[in-house]
Amino acid sequence: METKLAVPIAAKNLNEARQQTGAAKAAGAEILELRTDYLENISIWLVKKLITEAKRAGRSLPIIVTCRDKRQGGVRDCPQKLRIEVLVGVLEAGAEFIDFEYENFLSVENREKILPGLSQNSKARLILSAHNFETKFPNIDKLYRDILAVYPSAIPKLVYMANHINDCFEAFDLLHQTGGERIVFCMGEAGLASRIIAKKLKSFVTFASIDDESATAPGQLTIEHFKKLYRYDAINSDTELYGVIGSPIAHSLSPAIHNAGFADVGVNKLYLPLLVEGEKAEFDKFMQNILSRSWLGFRGFSVTIPHKQNALDYVRGNQGFVEPLAERIGAVNTLLIGKDGKLAAYNSDYAGALDAITSALCITRTDLRDLTVAIIGAGGVARAIVAGLSDAGSAIKIYNRTVEKAERLAEEFGCDFAGLDDLPTLDAKLVINCTSIGMHPNIDVTPLSKKYIKKDMVIFDTVYNPAETLLLKHAKEVGAKTIDGLSMFINQAAAQFKLFTGQEGNAELMRKSIIGSVEN
Ligand code: NAP
């Protein structure tokens, strides 16, 4: 059984419903969910008309009719009697599925009204749903069993709010341990990945909205996101999973890059955004959850702020392999999970930066020896680049607002250091901005005044949004050579891609996949 992509039609009236139905079908919906509780003037006549029209226009799709109780997320306070009449009425009009709340189905009176309608329409199915908009269910396994005990041919639908990504694993376990038709996933940003993984684990349906405005539940993705960004059509039970672990993660460019790359080389892999909020304890719990469920098929991660150090500690603590330079940098941004569950950790940031420099200057890493480099900044990115360049033998001077941080970093890697006040005396062939100055939305500032940029310098800005920062604009005006942060970002992603797939990533395609997401 393949998971179906269900699209809610949340219309106030007939005209809106026609428009939404057309859009949903055109975008690739596989089931329509008529959310009749959105209708302003609901009547059995109107709902039947909606169904007849939805069936006739274009591709005929199966229809779920829902008239949600306000206590379970419905938008209008429709009387229970009318809600049941609507659900029974639509069975005659050809709806394949009706969705009723499990807690209301427990009432004998309600049951006695719904069951005769179902028995007269042998093809129609009842979805018995339970929603928790606040948190996890106290016992999701028992709830699942209770639903089937009350009505064995029901399709149980259990949907709850994930307040942390670690809350999702109960949903995954239930899908893994049960078969047949059931709908299980989590709401909220922390639950986003569960809506996609639902297909790998064969949930009966997963829900997508037509666009951001028409989402009917927190964390619902659009059909376009599902299909274009998250390779929906390619997902099956053998799909290997990857993802970027971080917080925040909503605007990460990595899913677009890696999924485009996976599709390009034709591998059965999917890359997800994984919002892991909290600190070391939450990160460790997430990793334990992943490693104790090999059937989920997670094979690797990109790791970003604030977990690069946590990832290194976790791999060290679990006797995994750590790439020597990553060990020295004290942070990793790539994790691999072997078939035996063993972890390996790498840092592709330094490689990404070094590759951006060597390819822009048409030189090899050996040519970096004795190159004079000024690094502005002493945070995480500066650390990775200083480690890489000092390993290659460059002569480095670090400039930072907090001079003590520059001093500590310089001591560790045998470099010079200074405060930002010394920038006017800067004399280096390569200047690298490793601060966030100039990053969107504060794009009108630069870490180095134009008057200190010389024509024979190479100016590298690690900031990649916007692609052309004010610093790079100034450098171009002066006639200096420039390297943008996108090149480094794409290179580090390409290095990760090689670790994930064993194949070279297509850097040009990767750049194209994100170009609309950053300012030019
Ligand atoms: P971080 O660890 O927080 O370090 C930030 C650095 O910027 C510190 O040196 C900090 O100085 C300095 N800084 C911040 N605001 C400043 C200001 N107003 N004036 C002067 N100095 C300021 O951050 P990170 O992880 O190193 O990231 C830095 C930047 O690198 C990011 O903003 C991002 O644009 C870029 N980046 C690029 C890539 C890529 O692949 N291209 C990847 C990751 C990050 P203090 O020490 O004095 O606080």
Image: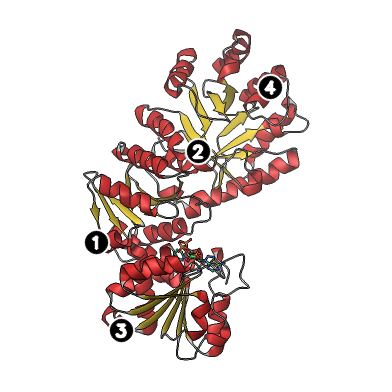
Q: Which residue is mark 4?
A: 83
**Badge nearest the viewer, 2 or 1:** 1
Q: Is residue 349 above or below residue 180?
A: below
Q: Amino acid at mark 2?
A: Thr
| Residue 310 left/right relative to 391 | right
Q: Give the mark nearest the N terminus, 2 or 1.
A: 2
**Numbered circle sitting on residue 332:** none
Is residue 489 visible in the rendered structure shown here? no
Secondary element type, mark 1: helix
Secondary element type, mark 2: strand
Q: Which residue is mark 2?
A: 206
Structural distance between the alpha carbons of marks 3 and 1: 23 Å
Query: Farthest residue toward the right?
Result: 41
Q: Quadrant of the C terminus?
A: bottom right
Q: Amino acid at mark 4?
A: Arg
Structural distance between the alpha carbons of marks 4 and 2: 24 Å
Is residue 241 visible in the rendered structure shown here? yes
Secondary element type, mark 3: loop
Q: Which residue is mark 3?
A: 370
Q: Quadrant of residue 327?
A: bottom left
Q: Position of residue 333 (x, y in %)?
A: 36, 57
Q: Quadrant of residue 349?
A: bottom left
Structural distance between the alpha carbons of marks 2 and 3: 57 Å
Camera-nearest residue between 167 and 219: 167
Q: Is residue 345 above or below residue 399?
A: above
Q: Give the mark nearest the N terminus, 3 or 4.
A: 4
| Residue 360 left/right relative to 126 | left
Please tell me which residue is depicted at 59% across the width and 50% down the height of the picture.
26
Q: Position of residue 110 (x, y in %)?
A: 62, 13
